[in-house]
Image (cartoon, coloured by chain):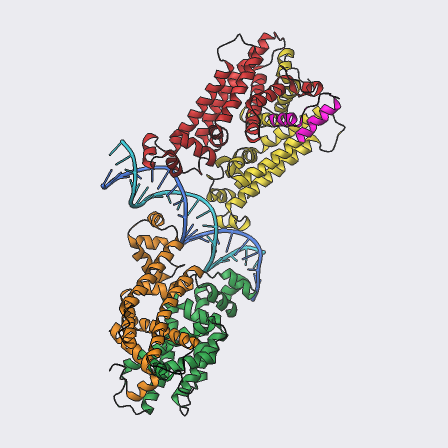
Chain colours: A red, B yellow, C orange, D green, E blue, F cyan
Amino acid sequence: MLDAAVRVFGRRGYRAASMEEIAELAGVSKPLVYLYLNSKEDLFAACVRREAVALTAAVRAGAGDPEPDVPVDRRLWAGLTAFFAHTADNPDGWAVLHRQARTSGEPFAAEVAAMREEITGFVTSLIVTAAREAHQDPALTARDVAGLAHALVGAAESLADWANTTPDVTAREAARTLMRFAWSGLGTLVRDGGRGPRG
Amino acid sequence: MLDAAVRVFGRRGYRAASMEEIAELAGVSKPLVYLYLNSKEDLFAACVRREAVALTAAVRAGAGDPEPDVPVDRRLWAGLTAFFAHTADNPDGWAVLHRQARTSGEPFAAEVAAMREEITGFVTSLIVTAAREAHQDPALTARDVAGLAHALVGAAESLADWANTTPDVTAREAARTLMRFAWSGLGTLVRDGGRGPRG
Amino acid sequence: MLDAAVRVFGRRGYRAASMEEIAELAGVSKPLVYLYLNSKEDLFAACVRREAVALTAAVRAGAGDPEPDVPVDRRLWAGLTAFFAHTADNPDGWAVLHRQARTSGEPFAAEVAAMREEITGFVTSLIVTAAREAHQDPALTARDVAGLAHALVGAAESLADWANTTPDVTAREAARTLMRFAWSGLGTLVRDGGRGPRG
Amino acid sequence: MLDAAVRVFGRRGYRAASMEEIAELAGVSKPLVYLYLNSKEDLFAACVRREAVALTAAVRAGAGDPEPDVPVDRRLWAGLTAFFAHTADNPDGWAVLHRQARTSGEPFAAEVAAMREEITGFVTSLIVTAAREAHQDPALTARDVAGLAHALVGAAESLADWANTTPDVTAREAARTLMRFAWSGLGTLVRDGGRGPRG
DNA sequence: GATGAATGAGGTTTCATTCAT
DNA sequence: CATGAATGAAACCTCATTCAT
């Protein structure tokens, strides 16, 4: 039943979606929807929550949350691949999170913001780990790292849309593009001609 | 009068915004809004158009469109600063463009897509110019560059939100963070400790 | 529910009638009206259709459609009586057909025109039959007959209004008046003093 | 200015007509219309009144109001011809009277009813004169004559519509058709084959 | 005196939400 | 328990009507 809701909400938006259409697509009657989930607002919140949990779980699973042995860049690469794969496999869920929930009033936007914060925090920890491994001396400040993490997450979101609307772009390719961009930087890329960190 | 519309549309979204609220905020009566702009759809289209024009103009003005003598990284830095400054000064306009217009039906999404394409194309041309200046041999493919441009634009959009919601983050700082991220790459940063291209 | 609509449409006209008033008179709420009949236009169309069908059915039933043994003048007399009785019993339906539908846009006017054509055609066939029975030699042309039929129908419509607004005029009396007028002609009447075809 | 109003009211109806369109067609501004005629209601009333006066005047002039020397049937024929000619020459005015005013609420319907009464009364007097001339014995009652007059007027109205919508039907032909019908009666016509009183 | 600019009131229509069955 | 039937509230839009210029 949530599947139907996610699909309709993702395609139409929160306001434009009608409970009628959701119930019809789910194959049940409207009052049943109200029985299980109290209101349109609760229904949408449940959708957002479910998709947020699924997305963060996918990313964490991909990046191998508690395995510090793997090199950081490898873990980042794996996390990005998982992210692109998940958004490609769940376009409606991704639409609910990235497009609709952020435009439909405070409560939903806050939920998505919290999810983003979680992912950004995860990315932040990866960057910090990498910096520690490199024994860098003049340390990046916490705010520096936060900004970098936000930039990386934003780049990933944008590439997800690009990959989902451009034919024949796979999750692997999107991840490779982003890794090259993010790890080596444009300055290096334009000098070396596009050879990325691992290739 | 468009100001009021941009504000309400940016905060509530296209569907949730009511002409009543817009008229009230503008200090006029509803029929007057319909006299000047024919319908809710036309009104929203006018808002989108105005904000899109203003944003692209600001970015181009900042990046110094027809001055090829300035180094590419400097022009990119200037364009980003202008972008962050503009979005910080026009949060509602930015919300209309980035959040609402893309989720409110084809005509509006297409308008924003065109604007994004314009900016992405501009960024692409900068990257190509940089690559040419570096006399790189194994050229980046067109698709590579497109992906990089999308990643950069997405990172900028994300940082704009971050800067607007985090206290005391200026446009200059956001631009510096993004330049470091984009130009040097995370790999370099974590090795060198955050010294950016010109820093 | 259609009853209420016919009453309000008949009294106020298509444009001046409000769905509010119709719903109120029907004792239901506005959305219910929209649930059963999709729009004001559809609702009016349904009213027109219903009244047109009812009127033609009444006239045909009165005139004894498939009984050619009865003399033509008798059948005409019966049809007129049925017509006057029906309009007297359904003044609002008659108003919808005769007054409102013809002034409320093409689709409705066309519907009524079709109904009128049907009745005129029926009358025409009666006249033709009468002429054939009389073995008349210099035949009436088709256009002659069409004109006569239109005149007869118009006279009937006018007498229906007269009968409905003048106290104590029955359908029988209206039919008798019209038959005398139509069959014998004024010239005969003023000579003979009002004795009709059958007395 | 009334010309424009009559044209718009006749084509659109009272409710559907907009003061905007009337003012535009008249080549003046809306407030000017309100200066000369106080409201939409007054404007429409003025149109109805003007057209009613014009029509009755035309009919009276045609029938030769105060000339009792001419035979009655001749006067009737002349009146009908005048009526058909006038409606053919003023289709919008005729539409205002016959279609719109009768469907737009009591005050206007009453005005038209009064006009009809006047014409019917005139016709009645003609019939009474004819009967008196014929020295008929068993007199027609007043109600009989009233009914006949209404029938004749209704037939004329219907034929006016028919003549205005059928190509190449002149006022003379319409009048001839109606006279044959009204004076001789169908019974005579079907026996004699369409030769009218003067034909 | 004529008008551009403005509005109050009301109309159709939709939709989230709830009872009685 | 699941549902068909029903509604309250609110949205977009129009138009007759009026001031300040």
Is B150 colored magenta in this rendering?
yes
Say which quadrant the C terminus of chain B sits in: top right
- Where's residue B34, x and y in %? 51, 49
Which of the 4 image quadrants contains residue B72?
top right
- State whether residue B159 is above or below residue B18: above
Along the horizontal axis of the image, is B186 left or right of B19? right
Magenta part of the chain: B122-151
- Where's residue A33, x and y in %? 34, 33
- State whether residue A68 is above or below residue D98: above
Is A161 colored magenta in this rendering?
no
| Residue drawn at 42 percent across, 75 percent down | C142
Counting the numbered discs, the total is: 0
Residue D123 visible somewhere in the drawing: no
Say which quadrant the N terminus of chain B sits in: top right
Q: Nearer the viewer, residue F2 or C134?
A: C134
Q: Nearer the viewer, residue A64 or C13?
A: A64
Residue B13 visible somewhere in the drawing: yes
Which residue is situated farthest in the right direction here?
A: B69
| Residue drawn at 30 percent across, 76 percent down | C72
Q: Nearer the viewer, residue A126 or B164?
A: A126
Which of the 4 image quadrants contains residue D174?
bottom left
- Where's residue B196, x and y in %? 66, 17
| Residue drawn at 58 percent across, 39 percent down | B111
Magenta part mainly helix, strand or loop?
helix
- Where's residue C159, x and y in %? 32, 74
- State whether residue A25 is above or below residue C188: above
